[in-house]
Amino acid sequence: MKHTSDSILKADQASYLESIESPRDALLVKMEAYATTHKQPISDPEVASFLAVTATAARPKRIVEVGTNIGYGAIVLARAAGPDARVDTIESSPELCAVARGFVEEAGLADRVTVIEGDAIVTLTKLEGSIDLVYIDCVKQDYPRYLELVLPKLSIGGLVIADNVLWKGLTAAAHVPQDERVRVEALRAFNQTITRDSSLRGVILPLGDGVAYATRIR
Ligand SMILES: C[S@@+](CC[C@H](N)C(=O)[O-])C[C@H]1O[C@@H](n2cnc3c(N)ncnc32)[C@H](O)[C@@H]1O
């Protein structure tokens, strides 16, 4: 559990939740240490736990992750969704793709997790087949466009999960610094779609930095 300025929980609540966590997985701990050392923005462990519970329950066959980084979310999702699930994860940085592929190999998931090097919007536009779960965790101002591209491919009952939708509290703030306005406006529009679009049933969870969670109902 992170004790950072973006965390929604009070420190004592975070410490309590940390104290009742199940023993950590060695590879995930290693990846968290790598991310800290190399200053890489992987998902928070509590968000990873949420991804794992969701994928375990929903058993999605085809998962797409937008924003791979070092492969942390992709590994969590692939493991939890089970041996029949495939994960396509998109990352624009060739260096990070190489790191992610190394960790995916180490996890024994190279046959089920494909790290696609490319721009997220370009790749989503070309991506074929239906999607059962999408995890959006990439460029914040592009969240509405990601959703627009993914929704027609999402199966009925399929899931949308998106990280950082409360953006350090800024999506709810009355005053937003100039350099955050484009991101915040995009996240506000995205959150409205998650909670109000007639094709979705969705909720914003106060987990990590805010997690959007929705299912396609029509
Ligand atoms: C927050 S990190 C993803 C963390 C990952 N989902 C996890 O669970 O640990 C976002 C990633 O998106 C990548 N990224 C940024 N712009 C991109 C783009 N236009 N297309 C694809 N990936 C991009 C960044 O390099 C970064 O590694």
Image: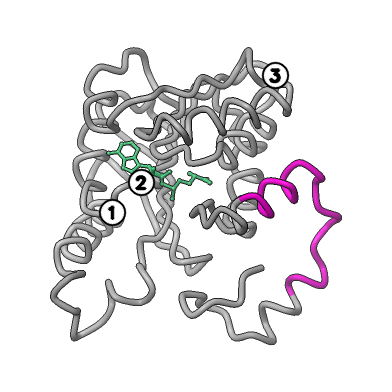
Q: Position of residue 45 (x, y in %)?
A: 64, 57
Nearest the eye: 210 or 141: 141
Image-quarter location of ligand 1: top left
Q: Position of residue 114 (x, y in %)?
A: 51, 19
Of marks 2 and 3, which one's residue comes earlier in the chain? 3
Secondary element at tag 1: helix
Kindly check if marks 2 and 3 are in contact, taking CB atoms under 8 A apart as contact: no
Q: Is mark 2 within 8 Å of ligand 1?
A: yes
Q: Is residue 70 above or below residue 9?
A: above
Is 29 magenta? The answer is yes
Of the two numbered discs 3 and 1 in the rendering, the one whose residue sits closer to the viewer: 1
The image quadrant where one finds the N terminus is: bottom right
Q: Position of residue 200 (x, y in %)?
A: 31, 44
Nearest the eye: 147 or 94: 94
Q: Quadrant of residue 76?
A: top right
Q: Is mark 3 within 8 Å of ligand 1?
A: no
Residue at 81 percent across and 53 percent down: it is 24
Label 2 sits on what residue type?
Cys
**Which portion, as a residue range, is magenta?**
17-34
Distance Cα–Cα, label 2 vs label 1: 6 Å
Label 3 belongs to which residue?
Answer: 83
Of the two numbered discs 2 and 3 in the rendering, the one whose residue sits closer to the viewer: 2
- Predominant secondary structure in magenta? helix
Is 42 magenta? The answer is no
Label 1 sits on what residue type?
Lys
Kindly check if marks 2 and 1 are in contact, taking CB atoms under 8 A apart as contact: yes
- Crowding at label 2, few (<14), some or many (≥20) Cα neighbours within 10 Å? many
Nearest the eye: 28 or 173: 28
Q: Is residue 1 above or below residue 124?
A: below
Label 2 belongs to which residue?
Answer: 138
